[in-house]
Amino acid sequence: MSTARYIEAIGRRKTAKARVRLTPSAKQSITVNGKTIADFFPIKEQADNALLPLKESEDKFTITALLSGGGISGQSDALRHGIARAILAHDASKRGVLKAAGYLKRDPRAVERKKPGLLKARKRPSWSKR
């Protein structure tokens, strides 16, 4: 495999998007928006969550990701989705493992829109008879 060749994938969650470039390499390194993953995600659990699909693969990669939109938690899930899709494009035999773990499913939950006449999506103004 050539080291100049990379695999690109997009991960999404709520309004967050992650463009992930995965390059096979000798040692693993992860860069998110020009920073290390530890600097970008201040909470360790979010960084660990984003890297879960890598535990299913024994290969080592250089990962470069561009995250935009959403909040820090949504971006973490979008990065996880993007990494899983890129690993799948790299090695199709990992599909069963990644799918069983739930990393390939795009989480469809999003904020419900506000309706007219209501205070929020479902909250109504208080009603009084008199």
Image (cartoon, helix red, strand yellow):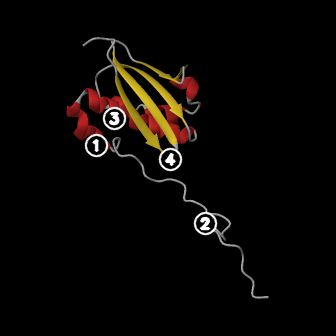
- Number of other residues with Cα within 10 Å of mark 4, as a class: few under 14, some 14 to 19, many 20 or more: some
Judging by the rendered image, the residue that carries numbered circle 1 is: 99
Along the viewing direction, whichever of 56 and 9 lies nearer the viewer: 9
Does residue 19 appear to the left or right of 3 in the view shown? right
Callout 3, which amino acid? Arg
Foreground label between 2 and 1:
2
What number is the disc on residue 115?
Answer: 2
Percent of width and height locating residue 101: 32, 43
Foreground label between 1 and 4:
4
- Whether tag 2 and tag 1 are in contact, CB under 8 A, the answer is no
Percent of width and height locating residue 118: 66, 69
Q: Residue at x 57, y 59 (%)?
A: 113
Q: CA distance from mark 2 to mark 1?
A: 36 Å
Foreground label between 3 and 2:
2
Q: CA distance from mark 3 to mark 1?
A: 10 Å
Q: Is residue 1 above or below residue 69?
A: above
Regarding mark 2 in the picture, which secondary structure is present there?
Answer: loop
Judging by the rendered image, the residue that carries numbered circle 3 is: 85
Q: Residue at x 50, y 28 (%)?
A: 66
Judging by the rendered image, the residue that carries numbered circle 4 is: 14
Q: Which badge, 4 or 3, comes first in the chain's sequence?
A: 4
Regarding mark 3 in the picture, which secondary structure is present there?
Answer: helix
Residue 121 visible in the picture: yes
Regarding mark 4 in the picture, which secondary structure is present there?
Answer: loop
Q: Residue furthest right?
A: 130
Q: Which badge, 3 or 1, comes first in the chain's sequence?
A: 3
- Number of other residues with Cα within 10 Å of mark 3, as a class: few under 14, some 14 to 19, many 20 or more: many
